Image (cartoon, helix red, strand yellow):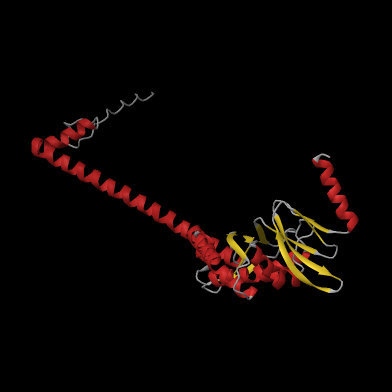
Amino acid sequence: MNKKIIIIATVSAAVLTGCATVGTAPDTVAVAYNAGPISAEEFTDCVGTSSRDYSGPFDLYYEYPASQRFYEFADGKESADAGTYTFVTKDGIEMKVTGVLNFDLETECDTLRVFHERIGKRSSAWFVDGAPSDGWRNMLDVYLGNPLETAIDRAGQAYTYSELYNDPAVKAKWESDVVGSLPDLVGRQTDGEEQFFKNFSVTLQKPQPPQSVIDALTEQQAAVARANAAKAQADAQAVAAQAQIEVEKAEAAKAQIWISILGPDGYLKKLATESHLNPWQPSGVVTQPQPTPAPATP
């Protein structure tokens, strides 16, 4: 009997005997529990990724993700887990922000069991056929969404709206503050010493103040631009005027040198010659010959 026949026979036997079974994917794990019509549900073991497990007909398996998951918050996006968050800045401006929180669920067996018994089962948060259930999404709203919103609000109170809106370095620091406070806030929400969620990273989009504030900020920036342009023009005119003064000073110094060499009259004759005038006219102006009047007609 080849391997394929053995597998088919095993699965068929499991079906015929009414065994419970689970087949995990490369990105899911499971917790297994013995159960029966007259016995209490009791934890037995964890099932790792890419595994198949069989047990008694009344036993139960609960699947959870073993790969990175994300929690997205944004308005007008059907796939988002929550809407846009609002927070108040240091200078009292209410701003809106969208973004994504990335995280991992702790799948170490003992911790995963506690998570399931304390949170997962109460919220029906296990995966169904390898996909997130409504219970999983609702659980994220409570145990990650609420702490995330608190972290964003608290961190935002350290900065002014213009810093967050205009300065990428401040925005990056704000994101870092949010990530830094999440483990403690999430731990308080889960009400336990175990860290059920880990490897947090947050990507926050540029926060948006109210439109009236954006308009005022735009006008302020335009006014600054106009003032800078006016100053640049005034500076250019001042430079040009100073350059003209320097030219005139240089011409005056040059004239003094020629006067010292030629004397005042000689210098005037030099200027007249350079201007294509008759230097020997007392006025320095060439006299134009007058036309002879025509004889009168008898």
In the rendering, at what x and y percent does residue 14 appear? 86, 54
The residue sitting at the front extreme is: 1
Determine if residue 98 is in view: no
In the rendering, at what x and y percent does residue 298 appear? 38, 23
Horizontal arrangement in the rendering, residue 179 relative to residue 255 (left or right): right
Q: Nearer the viewer, residue 218 or 18?
A: 18
Does residue 298 sit above or below 232 in this rendering?
Answer: above
For the point 84% across and 50% down, which residue is it?
11
Horizontal arrangement in the rendering, residue 67 relative to residue 287 (left or right): right
For the point 22% across and 31% down, which residue is it?
274
Q: Nearer the viewer, residue 23 or 178?
A: 23
Q: Nearer the viewer, residue 176 or 158?
A: 176
In which quarter of the view is residue 202 placed?
A: bottom right
Does residue 17 sit above or below 42 in this rendering?
Answer: above
Can you say which quadrant of the picture contains the N terminus?
top right
In the rendering, at what x and y percent does residue 75 appear? 70, 62
Horizontal arrangement in the rendering, residue 256 relative to residue 44 (left or right): left
Horizontal arrangement in the rendering, residue 162 relative to residue 276 (left or right): right
In which quarter of the view is residue 40 placed?
A: bottom right
Determine if residue 117 is in view: yes
